Image (spheres, rainbow, N blue to C red):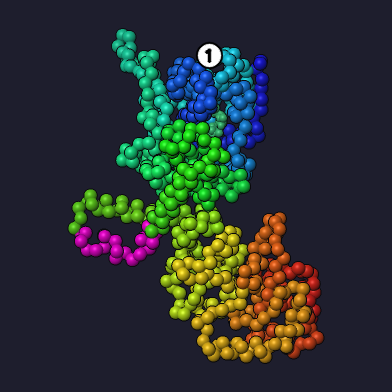
Amino acid sequence: MSKNTHSFQAEVAQLLHLVTHSLYSNKEIFLRELISNASDACDKLRFEALDNAALYEDAPNLEVRVAFDKKARTLSITDNGIGLSQQEAIDHLGTIAKSGTREFMSRLSGDQKADAQLIGQFGVGFYSGFIVADRIVVESRRAGLPADQGVRWSSTGTGDFEVETITRDKRGTSVILHLREDADEFLNGWKLKQVISKYSDHISLPILMEKEEWKEGEDDKGGEMVATGEWEPVNKASALWTRAKKDVTEEQYVEFYKSISHDYEAPLAWSHNRVEGSTEYTQLLYIPAKAPMDLWNRDHKGGLKLYVKRVFIMDEAEALLPSYLRFVKGVIDSADLPLNVSRELLQESRDVKAIREGSTKRVLSMLEDLAKKAVAAAAPAAESPAADGVTDVVDKKEGEQADADAAKASEDAGKYAKFYAEFGSVLKEGLGEDFANRDRIAKLLRFASTTSDAATVSLADYKARMKDGQEAIYYITADTLAAAKNSPQLEVFKKKGIEVLLMTDRVDEWALSYLTEFDGTPLQSVAKGAVDLGKLQDETEKKAAEEAAEAFKPVLEKLKASLKDKAEDVRVTTRLVDSPACLVVQEHGMSTQLARMLKQAGQKAPEVKPVLEVNAEHPLVKKLERDEAHFDDLANILFDQALLAEGGLPEDPAAYVRRVNALLV
Ligand SMILES: Nc1ncnc2c1ncn2[C@@H]1O[C@H](COP(=O)(O)OP(=O)(O)OP(=O)(O)O)[C@@H](O)[C@H]1O
C-alpha cells in the first residue's frame, strides 16, 4: 500500500483542537494515557493467546519500553502487545468509538477551564499525545500478521492522517512523539521516571527505560547523562490490587482510580479486600464523585474490570454487579474462574453470583459509612472530642492535627450528599431490582419533604418525627418540587402539621411501588386511594365529614353523570382545605403523572381515569348546588382545573377556555 491520506472523523478533529488548547495545564497525563493503551494492548494479546499461543511469536515476555532521543526531540512508547493492522490503525486512530461522544461534544462550552474538566472526564486516550507533540508517528504490526504487513500512521493532529505499509519485524506498537518546542522537560530520564511512577506504578507489566550514566564532558566542559544500552524496570510492576493494603498509599489508590475510570476527580470512597472462602477473589471498588455523562444512555455500560489470576479478561463485566450499581468502578480478580470465561458464561457462573453478592454488600456498606459520617457531622458539637474539655491544653502540633481532622471530617460529611445528588436516582432502581437488599437500600434513600426542600430526609428521620397516632409514611410524586409542594392533595396534611415526602425524580413512582413499607410502617401516596388519616382525625371531624357527604349526595350523582367520560368516580373528600377539587387514582393504579410521563416518552400507558374528589365546603363547589344553568360547564371546569393543578393539560384546552370565558362575562 502506498501512502494514503485519510481525514479524521469530525469529532476527532474538534477534540484534537481542544486537547492541544485546554489540557495544557496538565501536560504529563499523555504519558499515563499512552502507557495505559500499551498495557491494554498487552492484555489483549495475552487474552487472544489463550487460544492461540503462536501469537507470542518469539517474545513471550510482555513489556513496555519508554525511550527518548534528545537530538531528534522524540519520545517513544513501545509495547509488544497485540499491535494494529492497517485497517485497525485507520479505524481506531481516526475515530472515537466511545458511547456518549456526541453528547460530550455538545456540552463543551469554549470555556477552557470547564472544558478541560469535561475532557478529562471523557478521557482522550491516544489523542492526548498531541498535548506535547506536533507530530505523532505510530508504527505497528498486529500479532500473527507477517512482517511485511506492518503499518505506519502519522499525523500532525490537524485535519488528516497518513497511512502506509511498512515492514516491521517485531509485533506490537511504537508511538513516536515529535515533541513541541515547549515540551523539553520530557527529554529527561529523571522526569519521565517521576511521571511513570506517579501515574503508572500500578501497571502490572514492566515499564522499561534505558539505564543512564553520568559522562564527564571532554576538556572539563561539563558532562551529561548518557544511555548505557541496558534496560531496567522503572515501575513496581505489580498490579495495585494484588498488593497488601498497607503497601498502597492514598495517592496511589486515587491515581489508580483515575487511570481506570478516566475521571478527573478523586473518588468519594473505595474498598479493597481479599475475600476468602468457597469463592476467592480480590475486590477493589470505587465510588466516583461524579456521574459520567452517559449514565442515563441506554448504551451506557457499567461494570467492573475482570481479571482471573491477574490476567485481564474483560472490561465492563456487567455480571459482577447489579445494574443499579452501574456507577461503581473497580477491579475484581478471581482465583476460581476459568481463563476462557465469556460474558455468557459469567451470567451462569455460581462463582460470579457469589462475587456479585459480595460486591453488592461491600458497596452498600461503603454507602452506609458515608451516610453515617454525614449524620455524625450533623449531630450536636458536644459529641466531638475537641469540645469535651479534656483538650484544653494542646500543643501546637496537636492543634494542627485537630484542624486537619476537622477539615477531613467536614469533607467526609459532605460526601454522602454529593454521592446522592449524582447517583441517588440510580440507587433507587435497586428497590425494584435487588429484593434481598431492599431494606438496606431503603435506609440509604433521601427525599425532600414538606419540612426540607433539600433531599436530605431519610425514611428513618421521617419515622422519628411522625405524629402520635400517625400510621403511615405519606408521600407525593410530582414533576417538580414546586408542583409537589403546592399540590392540593397536601392541604389537609399541612393543616394538621403532618410531614409529607416530596418525590420529584422520574424513577420515584416506579421505585416506590416496590417499597410498600419501611421498618413496619406502610408507605402511602397521598394522591392514591381515599385519604385515610386514621387516628389523626378526631370523631367530630369524621362525623362532620360524613354528614357533609350525605347532604352532598344528590349533587354528587349529577357530577358523576356530567363527568362520566372523564372521571372513574366522584366523591367528597376531607383532604382539601383551600382547593375546590383534586384528582386521585385508585389505590393500586398508575398515577396520572407517571402515565403522562410514559406517553411523553412515546411509550404505551394505560388510560388512567382518575377519581375526582371535591371539597364540599368550597364556594365553587357550593355554587354547583345553586347554578342549574351552568352545572355542566362548572363540573367540567372543576375537573380540568384539578388536572391543571397537578401539571396536566385538559383534553380539550379550547373547550376549557370557552367554558371559563362564558362564566367570566
Ligand atoms: N498501543 C496500542 N496498541 C494497540 N492498539 C492501540 C494502542 N493504542 C491505541 N490503540 C487502539 O486505538 C484505540 C483508541 O485508543 P484511545 O486511547 O483513543 O481510546 P481507548 O483506549 O479505546 O479508550 P480509553 O483511552 O478511553 O480507554 C484503542 O481502543 C485501541 O484499539
- Could you tell me how many numbered marks the image carries? 1
Say which of 53 and 511 sits in front: 53
At 52% from the left and 21% from the top, the residue drawn is 55
Q: Taking the image as drawn, is residue 489 in sight?
A: yes
| Above or below for 211 versus 624 | above
Residue 201's spot in the image, x, y percent? 39, 32
At 33% from the left and 38% from the top, the residue drawn is 244
Q: Residue furthest top?
A: 219
What is the quadrant of residue 612 in the picture? Answer: bottom right
Residue 174's spot in the image, x, y percent? 51, 21
Q: Which residues are magenta?
A: 373-392
| Above or below for 502 versus 83 | below
Residue 581's spot in the image, x, y percent? 66, 78
What is the quadrant of residue 655 in the picture? Answer: bottom right
Residue 582's spot in the image, x, y percent? 65, 75
At 41% from the left and 25% from the top, the residue drawn is 207
What is the quadrant of residue 524 in the picture? Answer: bottom right
Chief secondary structure of the magenta span?
helix
Q: Residues within 10 Å of mark 1 (few under 14, many from 20)?
A: few
Examine the structure image and report whether residue 382 is included in the region drawn in magenta. Answer: yes
User: Which quarter shows the N terminus?
Assistant: top right
Q: Taking the image as drawn, is residue 32 in sight?
A: no
Residue at mark 1: 169
| Above or below for 584 versus 255 | below
- Type of residue at label 1? Asp
